[in-house]
Amino acid sequence: MQTVETLNEGLKRAYTLTIPAGEIEARVDAELKRVAPQMKMPGFRPGKVPANLVRKMHGPALHQDALNNSIQQGVQSLLAEQQLRPAIQPSVELAEGYEPGKDAELTVSLEVLPQVPTPAIEGLKLERLTVPVADEAVAEQLQKFADAQKRFEDAGDKAAEQGDQVTVDFVGKTMDGVAFEGGTGEDMAIEIGAGRLIPGFEDQVVGAKAGEERQIKVTFPADYPAKELAGQDATFDLTIKSVKVAGESVIDDELAKNLGLESLDQLKELLKGQLEQQNNGLTRTYMKRKLLDQLAAGHDFEVPPSMVEAEFDQIWHQLQHEATHEPDPEAAIAEMESERDDYRKIAERRVRLGLLLSEIGQANGVEVSQQEMSRLIMQAAQQYPQEQRQQFMQYVQSEPMAAAQLRAPLYEDKVVDFLFEKAEITDRETTREELEAAIESEDGFATGTHHHDHDNHKPKQKKAAAKKADAGEGDAEAKPAKKPAAKKKAAADEPAADAPAADAPADQVAPAKKPRAKKAAPVEAETTNVTSDPAAAEAAEGAGAADAPAKKPRAKKKAAEA
């Protein structure tokens, strides 16, 4: 094989490879000898089919396989001989006019990873803001918990009011009277005013009495998951089965026992532990931001444009998706366009941080164990229907790039934990509100921890709560304070998700296939207590909250950090 370098500019490389026809033909002959004894053909005994007949029948397929294998081996040899670390999969093109029997001329183009300077990890100083859990906070959560478990008592022939629970049978129909799929049900309990159903549904049940039949008209939201119903008018024929009034919320041992616990004290301890976990998650988010700030400020080197472009595309796609759910989508998109250059700088910063963390992890022996990897695969498989889980696990195990993408967040967190151990840390006690404000005061999208609630289409604290979600900060923002959401979410400090990990091949940066979100039932749309993250066992990572805040005004972004 002959190799000629045709481009060496910055991180871009290009080569021309020539694979001799004889090498390709030798592969064909070798494969022919292997398969000929296994061939069957009428008129010949098994294994006695002449090689020339096998070649005549299967020659084109054998040659194509041989060519593909030669190309693959040629590219791998090129990478090894030139000591190249691809940033993305190399682009390989076969010269036009190639025919069997001729040399194969290839053009191989790629971008290589930069030589990352030895990261400076000495002298890191961090402040750990801690939030003790007050008894009042536990009492507040306990009251919310009790309210969610409140009992309803039969109200006889009373007309339904706000706060009452109405049990109905229903049949949903299009405006031409045809029942639609998923629009029929029995004994559905509706708490009027809870906002769990499509707009206008609950309001039209007010005044209903047990035994009554009525028809209501609604309009499905434009972004409704069932596309055939999105934005469409429909009717629902209702049969009112019962009307119940809410009893008082009682906080006692019985409440705890109904949950399988021994006592109210045990429930309080569990709630306190949950709040501590949330506060610890916030603390870690803040520390991680400050850590990545210091890394970014101390290192500046060229990064592969293709990786930056891929990261920018990911950010941009996410922003476009969220813009469609803003009150004024056109204005949101226009604002995005005016800040396109800032987001591109953010993408570059994220890629650089990803490469830095990878270098730090590799230099210090940070690894993701096989046991940890198996657990990640099992957790990811839970997103799929039961019958597809085994197929997904086999896919990840056979596709190194998919495995690398799954491994990346855990690997990153392990590197961050390593750096925490190296840093000089001072502690300061604060309040949850002050800690949240400190997180939100940072330029959010710069940290790559942006999160969007795809079930509710409500940006959750786009600067702080979101930041934790993609950074794997667990349940830290399970109940965020109601503050204006900021537009520049969480990106410039967080490493790019597709930066190659040190313990994975450098060119394995393509994302793993992700499962599609489950479609919501046609009637129960836009609830405020749906969690979308499958790893609920991992403290509801990025799941939002039962009392997720309503959409708030968008705040102007800060200037992007270089």
Image: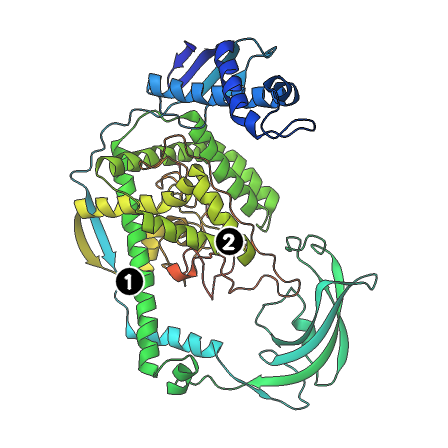
Residue 117, position in %: x, y?
25, 27
> Residue 431, which numbered label?
1
Observer-nearest residue: 373 or 238? 373
Mark found first going from the N terminus, 1 or 2: 2
Q: Is residue 534 above or below residue 242?
A: above
Q: From the image, which quarter does the N terminus lie in?
A: top left
Tell me what residue is drawn at x 48 percent, y 13 percent: 23
Q: Can residue 171 be seen by looking at this rendering?
A: yes
Residue 457 percent location from the top left of the image:
55, 54
Q: Nearer the viewer, residue 443 or 516?
A: 516
Along the viewing direction, whichever of 253 and 365 lies nearer the viewer:
365
Distance from disc 1 to disc 2, alpha carbons, whole Å, reads 43 Å
Crowd band around label 2 with a 10 angstrom C-alpha radius: few (<14), some (14–19), many (20+): some
SS at circle 2: helix
> Which residue lies at the image location 73% right of the left edge and 85% below the top edge?
211
Tell me which corner region of the image, top left, top right, bottom left or bottom right, holds residue 402: top left
Q: Which structural element holds mark 1? A: loop
Q: Nearer the viewer, mark 1 or mark 2?
A: 2
Q: Nearer the viewer, residue 547 or 510?
A: 510
State the count of labels: 2
Q: Quadrant where the C terminus lies?
A: top left
Q: Which residue is mark 2?
A: 389
Residue type marked 1:
Thr
At x 52%, y 12%, the residue is 104
Q: Amino acid at mark 2?
A: Arg
